[in-house]
Image: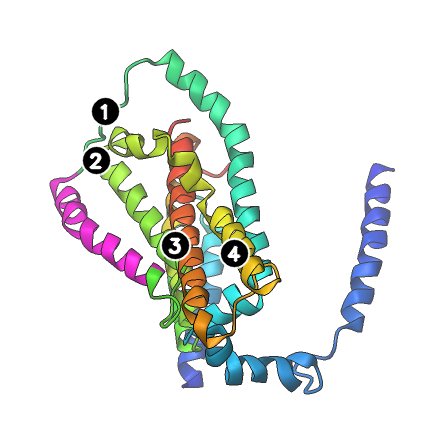
Amino acid sequence: MSTAFDIVLLLLLIAIALAVARTKDLLAASIIFSAYSLVLCLLWQHRGSPDVAMTEAAVGAGITTVLFLVAISKTVRREK
Amino acid sequence: MKKALVIALLIIAAIPLLIGVAALPPHGDADTPVQTHVSARYLEKGVEEARTVNIVTAVILNYRGIDTNGEVTVIFTALAASFAVLLPAAMARRAASAESDEAPPVSMVVLFVTRLLAPFIALFALYVMLHGHSSPGGGFQGGAILGGLFVALSIVLGAEKVEPLLKSPFAPWLRIAAPLAFVAMGVFGALLTGFYLGFPQQEALRWASEAMVLIIEIGIGVGGAMIFATLFAEMEAQ
């Protein structure tokens, strides 16, 4: 369990979260948000909880992103 | 005036919550039940009592089984609620445009890769679902992977290719599979042990305990996959 790797992942998480909040293009924001789930999945795995990591990868990075994309395709792409 | 009322209501609502937080033991306190005996009991006796090597599954399905039973019921209720909102609009849209939507133009590479990977994804989903008692994973994770496969196939091949599954007479039963499997196994456990969701401990009934875990995992997996696939199809039909 190297703490340095955890710190890198956590800093990456904060950076991605800020990027999601600042992005006006909702399509881009959804894709960045799926990267957030992917980094979080790595963090779960590294902290020794593979069950949660699997759920995060399948639901967070997969299904949620697809549902976001469907919602965007049915509405508008730009945040007003 | 309205703003002041809202702030006053928020403060009134916050007081009991803050009192509740103040009553919590400090973070990392060594004297809480979790630290003194609960976790230790799960880790020491989990394999023997719950008959599952993966302690996470033992906690989710056995020690805290009634919690999980409630959770899967909540997920199914959420789907039913979204149905109530989405279905009438989708039905009206369908009736208005009689022709079925054609498969969207997909790049040949995406089409080929999805078709090539589909059986392997399905196999992996089943493995995760059925192997949850002895390795990381379980019904929910496997169901999410299977649901993701349905979504990918309906994007690449067109929605009408997966429609027979969603419109079949078994579809409602598959959607409610998770709570159904849980309640069925709960009653089965009640018949064997006298407690709802009681897992028999005797050596002679070991098979029953293992079968209950397996059936619940399959139920959660199939139900979860169906719920994801249905949600996607409903949103797509808007």
Query: Which residue is at the front of the view, B33 or B173?
Result: B173
Q: Nearer the viewer, residue B114 or A33?
A: B114
- The image's colouring method is rainbow
Considering the image in quadrants, where does the N terminus of chain B appear?
A: top right
Q: Which residue is mark 4?
A: B188
- CB within 8 Å, label 2 to label 1: no
CB under 8 Å between callouts 3 and 2? Answer: no
Region of the chain picked out in magenta, as a range: B107-129
Q: Which residue is mark 1?
A: B102
Q: Callout 1 environment at 10 Å: few (<14), some (14 to 19), or many (20+)? A: few
Quarter-wise, where is residue B211 in the image? Answer: bottom left
Q: Residue at x 37, y 35 (%)?
A: B170
Q: Earlier in the sequence, mark 3 or mark 1?
A: 1
Q: Amino acid at mark 4?
A: Phe
Label 3 lies in what chain?
Answer: B
Against B171, is A20 above or below? below
What distance separates the C-alpha of mark 2 from that of mark 4? 41 Å
Marked residue nearer the N-terminal end (2 or 1): 1
First in sequence: mark 3 vs mark 2: 2
Label whose residue precedes the other's in the sequence (3 or 4): 4
The residue indicated by pointer 2 is: B157
Q: Who is closer to the viewer here, A44 or B180?
A: B180
Element type where label 4 sits in the image: helix
Q: Is residue B134 above or below residue A1?
A: above
Chain under disc 2: B
Residue B236 sits inside the magenta stretch: no
The residue pinned by badge 3 equals B218
Mark 4 burial class by Cα count in 10 Å: few <14, some 14-19, many 20+: some
The answer to whether marks 3 and 4 mark residues whose Cβ atoms lie closer than 8 Å is: no
| Disc nearer the start of the sequence (1/4) | 1
Residue B104 location in percent, x, y? 23, 30
Which marked residue is nearer to the observer: mark 2 or mark 4?
A: 4
